[in-house]
Amino acid sequence: MSYTLPAADSFHVGTFIKTTSPQVVEILGGTGLDFAVLDAEHAPFDRAALDLALLAGRAAQLPLLVRVVDREAATLLSVLDLGAAGVLVPHVDSAAQARDVVAHCRYVGGDRGFSSLPRAAGYGALGMKAAIAQGDRSVVMCQIESVQAVEQAAQIAAVPGVGGIFIGRADLALSMGLDDAQHAQVLAATERVIRAGLEAGKVVGMVVGSLAERERYLAFGVRWFLQASDQALLRQAAQAIARPASARQGAA
């Protein structure tokens, strides 16, 4: 399923999906979210689970990207053949790594292997020319989440084929020797990366924890937001209707 990143005068909101349930994808498809990201880096998505989730996304008309576990060519080929609208690639620390990622995701000018038979090619119905054109529209988002990546953010964003850069503040904090993603040093680095991405004319994305934080970074020029996850949304909703702890203790 194809997906286009937001224009400069708009923004998109999605969430992480961390449970390997196609029904979760189906439910989220009816919520008005612009997209979602299957988190194969931090959740137990094997190829079979990704296949079912991406099938559900297509049925629910919910564009799905995959946060892959690594930058290897075989990993990127696999999720794109399954029909992912794009990839969110962790730990891209240099322009050279970004160029390799783009090459692995592109037929023309890249090294992505071609088959006419997977979902991405319409199981043979598209024909080679149309399948190549569609495949080369896959979105590539590079995660900036280390001190080195912050230093290289402008060069990474400038790589042709990189659709946008995504700031991973938790790992960035760890890279700085910190355990607080809201530390002043992390926030300063975040703003530096945002400026680098915007100056390169690319979309900038990040995780936000609240609507207020989303509005704050929208004013900075961020246009691609991931908020919470299926797990977090379920937990929040359950906590909202649960009896207070004092009432549960009294019943016991």
Image: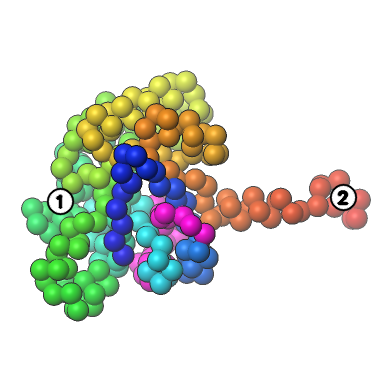
The label on residue 26 is none
| 72 displayed left or right of 51 | left
- Left or right of 35? Residue 102 is left
**Which residue is at a point 44% across and 51% down the rendered structure image?**
14
Across and down, in percent, residue 126 comes to: 18, 74
Magenta includes 241? no
Q: Is residue 79 visible?
A: no
Q: Where in the figure is residue 108, as x and y percent of width and height?
A: 9, 57
Q: Check if residue 42 falls in the magenta segment.
A: yes
Is there CB contact under 8 Å for labels 2 and 1? no
How far from the left and from the top, in percent, is residue 85?
30, 59
Magenta-colored span: 31-55
Disc sitting over residue 103 in the figure: 1
Quadrant location of residue 231? Answer: bottom right
Give the amino acid at mark 2: Ala
Quadrant where the image shows the C terminus: bottom right
Query: Where 59 sits versus 167, above or below?
Result: below
Query: Residue drawn 47% across and 63% down?
Result: 29
Left or right: 122 in relation to 181? left
